[in-house]
Amino acid sequence: MSLDAFPEHILLTPGPTPLHPHALQALSRPMLGHMDPEVFALNCEIQGDLRVMYGTAPGTFTALLAGTGSLGMEAGFANLVEAGDEVLVCANGSFGRRMAEMAARYGARVRVVTAPLGEAIRADDVAAELAKSGDIRMVAVVHGETSTGVLNPVPEIAELVRDTGALLAVDAVTTAGMEPFHMARWGVDYAYTGAQKCLSAPPGVAPVAISERALARHAARRTPTPLWYCDFEGLRDYWTRQTYHHTVPVNLHFALHAALRAALDEGMAARQRRVQQVGEAIVSALAPLGFSPYVRRPQDRLPTVLALRLPQGFDDAGVRQALRAREISVTGGLGPTAGQIWRLGLMGEAARPGPYRALMRALEDLLGVRGVMERFEAALDGVLV
Amino acid sequence: MSLDAFPEHILLTPGPTPLHPHALQALSRPMLGHMDPEVFALNCEIQGDLRVMYGTAPGTFTALLAGTGSLGMEAGFANLVEAGDEVLVCANGSFGRRMAEMAARYGARVRVVTAPLGEAIRADDVAAELAKSGDIRMVAVVHGETSTGVLNPVPEIAELVRDTGALLAVDAVTTAGMEPFHMARWGVDYAYTGAQKCLSAPPGVAPVAISERALARHAARRTPTPLWYCDFEGLRDYWTRQTYHHTVPVNLHFALHAALRAALDEGMAARQRRVQQVGEAIVSALAPLGFSPYVRRPQDRLPTVLALRLPQGFDDAGVRQALRAREISVTGGLGPTAGQIWRLGLMGEAARPGPYRALMRALEDLLGVRGVMERFEAALDGVLV
C-alpha cells in the first residue's frame, strides 16, 4: 500500500486530533539519540511546561511515558498499588471500567462507585464509600469520560479524598491542556494524558505528573512494581538523573515539545474559550435537525467531547460512512450508546471553526437540508475563536 | 529551545540509527485514526512483512507494541510467566541481566546462565541447566548483546530447548532485520526488536512475533497478566479482530511500514553483506591505530554492534566529545567496559560507507594520523555495498 494514497482527513473524533502544524514540523527533525544533551535539554523544557499544564506544585515530577494514554493509566496502578490494597474506582464509562480492571490485575481489592450512563459520578457516593472503610489506599477517577462525554467532579472528589490518606489518581486524557486542571490546588497525586488529545501532538507518548506524596508511596513499596518499563524510579533515572533507562521515542518528544509550547503560548484560558464557543456553535447549528446534548445536566457535560443524541431514525452508520467518503471522520457511541450518539472531538486543533465548517457543509449536502452552515456562522459571529 | 538549532547528526551508535529516508517521509504523512480502515490495511501489511523478517511459520501472530524494545522484553515475561514459574535466563550483559530482573518482577524463580564479559553464552552451560531441572517453563536469551557486541548462539540454544516443553524467548533487538533470524526453523516462541535498530525507523514501536505455542501458553494462564497494555489477547483484539484496545502511534506505524518494506525490498542477504563489508573495512582502517576487536572469538562477534578495544592510552571521552562537536555520535562502553571500548552501530542506515567515511575523516584529523581513510576505501574497493 502506498502511503501517498491516503488523502488528508479531517479528524473530528475524540482522538487522535489533527496535528498542530508545529508538531508536524518537529516530527521530522533530524534524528538524535535519547542520551544526547540536546534531547535532555528539550526534556527539561517539556517537564517545566507540563508542570504549568497540570498546575502542579513547583517540585512535582513530570515526564513522558513511552506509550499511549492507557499506559499512563496502567503506570499509576502498577507503581502505586500493591497486592491487597483497597482501591476505590469511580467508573461511569469504559475508561473508568478499564481503571477497575487494571487495578484488579495489580492485585488491588477494587471497590467501585458508578453512575447511570451519561451522568457524572456523584461526590456524595464517593463520600459514602470513603466513610465505609478507613483503609482505602487510592481513589481513581476519569476526569472526562471519553466514552459518554461526561465530566466528573474531580475538584469535589479531591476535597473528599484530601485528608483520608488515600492517593488520588486522575485520568486527564480529555481535559489537561484544554480544560481547567489544577493538580496542586485540587490535591491530585497522579495525572496522565495522551499526546494526541488536547495537545494535538502525535500519539505514542503519555505526559504524566506525579506528586511528592505519590513518589513517597512508591518508595515505600514492599515489593517492586512488576512494570519495569514505567517504574517511577526508572523514569527518574532518565528524566532527573539523565542516566539510561530505556530508549525514548525522540521524534515524538520533538513533536510534543512543539505542541505543548504552542498550547502554553496560546494560553489555557483562550483554549477553554474556543472549545466552548465552537461547541455552542455546533449545538446551535444542529439542534433544529434534532440533535440534542446526550448528557442531561449541563454541569456534567465534558466540553472537549461533545456527545450529541442523534435525531429519531437517523442513519448513524450510513451518514458517518458518507462523511468519511468526503474525508471527514466522526465517531459514534461506544457499547450501549452505539447508534444513539455522536461524539465530536473538541480537543486541540479540532476545536476550531475550520474543521467543523467542513462538517456543517457536508451535512447540509448529505441530509438535503439548509441553514446549518448559516446557524453555525451566526453562533460564531462576533465571538473570538 | 528552538528545534531549528539542532544540526544534522551522524548517528554511529548502537541505536537509534539514522532514519531511512522513506521512514522520515512517511512519518509526516497526514494523520489518521487508529481505527481507520487505511490504518488496518497498513497494519496487515506490517504483520505480513514482519513474518518474513522474523522467518515465522505462516500463521504466527505479529504486531507492533506501542513502546520501545524494552517493552517488547517486558511483554514476553508479563504474558508468558506466572508467579512461581521457573525461568532460565542467559545473561552475559546488561540486557540479559535486564531480562532476569523483569522475569523476577513477574514472580518467576529465575535461574541464570552467564559467561565472562565479552564472551558468548555456551550452549553446553544451557544444556547443563536444562538437565538439572525438568520444570523450566521458559528460556530467555539476548541474541545480540548490545552492551558488549556479543552474538549468542541462539540456533544451538533453540535446539536444546526444543523438546523440553519450555518456551524460548529471544531478544532480536540488534539482529532481526539485518542478521539471519529464523523463528520457525530454530523454534523461537517469542521475539521482539525496536523500530530504531536494524530497520532504521523512529523509536517508539516494538515489532513482536508470538508463536502458536506461546499463544496457547498465554491462553492457559491461571491468572490474567498484570500488563493490560500488552496483554496478548488485547493485542489480538486490535491486530486480528480490528476492535479497539488502545490508541496506537499511527505516525510511527506509517514510518515503520515504509522502513520495513524498504528492508525487504533490499533483501536480508544484501543487508547482511553490507554489515559485514562495512564492519571489515572499519577494522582494516583502524587496526594500525591500535583498535582491535573486543570480542575474542570471531564466531562470538555481533556484526551489527562492532565492539572495538581502544588503543593503549586513548582519550576515549575527549575524542568522542570532539567527534560530537563535528556532529558524529560514537558510543563507548557500558559499565565495566566504559573507557575501554567503542561500540559502533552497523544497523540499518548506519551500515553504509557514507556515515563511516565521515568518522574516518574526522579521526585522521583529530588524531593527526594519515592513511585511515585510504585503508577504509581500499577495504571497500571492489566489494558491493
Image: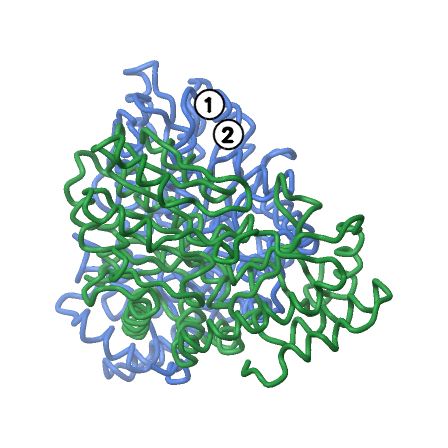
Chain colours: A green, B blue
Where residue B280 appears, as percent x and y from the top left, is 41, 61
Tell which of A385 and B48 is nearer to you.
A385
| Same chain check for tags 2 and 1 | yes
- Disc 1 crowd rating (10 Å Cα; few below 14, some 14-19, many 20+) is some
Splitting the image into 4 quarters, where does residue B62 fall?
A: top right
Q: Residue at x 21, y 32 (%)?
A: A135
> Can you identify the residue that label 1 sits on?
B162
Q: Quadrant of residue A260?
A: bottom left
**Badge 2 local density, few (<14 within 10 Å), some, or many (20+)?**
many
Horizontal side, residue B199 vs residue A342: left or right: left
As rendered, which of B167 and B35 lies closer to the eye? Answer: B35
Q: Residue at x 29, y 28 (%)?
A: B107
Q: The disc numbered 2 marks a residue on which chain? A: B
Quadrant position of residue B342 = bottom left
Residue A308 image point, x, y percent: 64, 56
Helix, strand or loop under label 1: loop
Of the residues shown, which amino acid type is indicated by label 2? Answer: Gly
Q: Are marks 2 and 1 in contact (CB under 8 Å)?
A: yes
Residue that badge 2 annotates: B187
Quadrant into which the C terminus of chain A falls: bottom right
Q: Is residue A206 left or right of residue A345?
A: left
As measured in the structure, the alpha-carbon distance from the residue carrying label 2 to the one carrying label 1 is 7 Å
- The answer to whether residue B56 is above or below residue A183 is above
When the figure is inspected, residue A189 is found, relative to residue A28, above or below; the finding is above
Q: Check the residue under mark 1 and report the chain it is in.
A: B
Residue at 56 percent of width and 71 percent of height = A351
| In the displayed structure image, the side of residue B85 where residue A377 appears, left or right | right
Where residue B237 appears, as percent x and y from the top left, is 59, 38
Going by the numbered disc 1, the residue's amino acid type is: Arg
Callout count: 2
Residue with the most extreme right position: A368
